[in-house]
Image: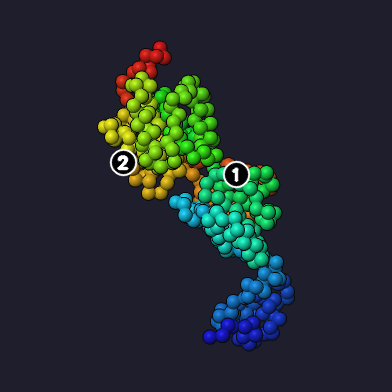
């Protein structure tokens, strides 16, 4: 079946091709509303759709946005980040062209060249985790960085507010009455690790709780197994040094804390309170008891990046990093410290 042409619309509406063009392109003219309605009805009747190529040549817009990432499609958080970007694009009549480079610089270079050749209206450069990145030479000015920051600035970017998130996670345990709070950290060395540690230290300091280096322990890679081994070292400390609350770098490591506690017959949160980070799907809420955690705002970051790329947000400064709030998700893994510990704490403060 052949594609309907503008001449077919003109014939069906009983008007000239010029009139059809003026109406369908919303050009101001003296054409009556009755004629305009007849033209639109005729276009629907014959199944006419304007050429996107012709429209882009006329408006200098392709109504497309390129989104390039390293390995985001293989991470458990990709869905929410992409959903935020796509929702914002759709609301502004744009289509997202997504390319996952797998971290290959040659693929990345070719992808940027292809998207520029397609004359996308904007470009977003995304990372699978919060990090500082070198800006690809061919990346166009005005591109937006998502879940990463350009090392020398010059572009708008959005990342999680990890320092504030670490502070908030530690405050949850402090407000529940805990004074011996451990930070079970990763050994991978991401930026988020240092920022969350800073937040942990600041929360303790603000609460007048001395920082105990023995309660900051690294669990190898950020997995449940490495965290379990590290958590066992914490739980093997003498009773007066053992933590009553643990803030884990991420939810997978919190699962390792659960496993270590269960091996020792400890109940969560009666004997040990645990806070995670990420609010990872099928992990945090599925624990027994469900895990209190800090959510990474992937949907909100994806939406922010797209809105800035399309110029519909006023807070997308061209050389600034926006730190997106990481909210606490309260579940059942935090309670007051065990009664005997609470009594000891009260005696020390009198």
User: Front-most of 95 and 127?
Assistant: 127
Residue 47 location (% of width, % of height):
56, 80
Residue drawn at (61%, 50%) of the image? 145
Q: Determine the secondary structure under disc 2.
A: loop
Question: Which image quadrant for residue 99?
Answer: bottom right
Label 1 Cα crowd, 10 Å radius (few <14 / some 14-19 / many 20+): some
Q: Is any part of residue 13 visible from this angle?
A: no
Residue 86 location (% of width, % of height):
54, 58
Of the numbered discs 1 and 2, the one sitting upstream in the chain is: 1
Rendered position, 62 above or below 163: below
Q: Residue 288 carries which label?
A: 2
Identify the image quadrant of the C terminus. top left
Residue drawn at (69%, 76%) of the image? 22
Of all residues, the one furthest to the left in this rendering is 265
Q: Residue 253 carries which label?
A: none
Label 2 Cα crowd, 10 Å radius (few <14 / some 14-19 / many 20+): few
Residue tagged by mark 1?
Answer: 132
Of all residues, the one furthest to the right in this rendering is 29
Q: Determine the secondary structure under disc 1.
A: strand
């Amino acid at each position: 079946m052949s594609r309907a042409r503008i001449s077919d619309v003109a014939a069906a509406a009983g008007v000239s091709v010029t009139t059809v063009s003026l109406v369908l392109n919303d050009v101001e003219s003296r054409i009556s509303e009755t004629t305009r309605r007849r033209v639109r009805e005729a276009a629907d009747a014959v199944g006419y759709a304007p050429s996107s190529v012709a429209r882009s040549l006329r408006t200098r817009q392709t109504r497309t946005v390129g989104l390039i990432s390293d390995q985001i499609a293989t991470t458990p958080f990709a869905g929410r980040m992409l959903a935020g970007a796509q929702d914002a694009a759709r609301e502004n009549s744009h289509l997202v062209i997504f390319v996952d480079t797998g971290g290959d610089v040659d693929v990345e270079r070719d992808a940027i060249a292809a998207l520029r050749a397609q004359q996308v209206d904007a470009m977003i450069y995304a990372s699978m985790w919060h990090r500082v990145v070198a800006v690809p030479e061919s990346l166009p000015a005005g591109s937006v960085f998502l879940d990463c920051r350009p090392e020398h600035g010059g572009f708008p970017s959005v990342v999680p507010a990890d320092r504030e998130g670490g502070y908030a996670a530690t405050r949850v345990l402090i407000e529940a009455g805990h004074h011996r709070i451990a930070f079970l950290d990763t050994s991978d060395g991401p930026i988020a690790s240092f920022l969350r540690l800073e937040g942990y230290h600041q929360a303790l300091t603000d609460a007048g709780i001395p920082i105990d280096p023995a309660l900051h322990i690294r669990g190898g890679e950020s997995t449940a197994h490495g965290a379990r081994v590290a958590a066992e070292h914490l739980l093997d400390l003498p009773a007066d040094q053992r933590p009553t609350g643990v803030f884990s770098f991420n939810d997978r490591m919190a699962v390792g804390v659960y496993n270590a506690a269960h091996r020792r017959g400890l109940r969560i949160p009666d004997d040990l309170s645990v806070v995670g980070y990420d609010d990872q799907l099928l992990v945090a809420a599925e624990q027994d008891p469900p895990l209190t955690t800090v959510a990474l705002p992937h949907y909100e970051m994806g939406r922010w990046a797209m809105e800035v790329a399309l110029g519909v947000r006023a807070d997308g400064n061209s050389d600034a990093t926006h730190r997106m709030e990481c909210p606490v998700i309260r579940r059942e893994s935090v309670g007051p410290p065990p009664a005997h510990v609470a009594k000891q704490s009260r005696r020390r403060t009198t």
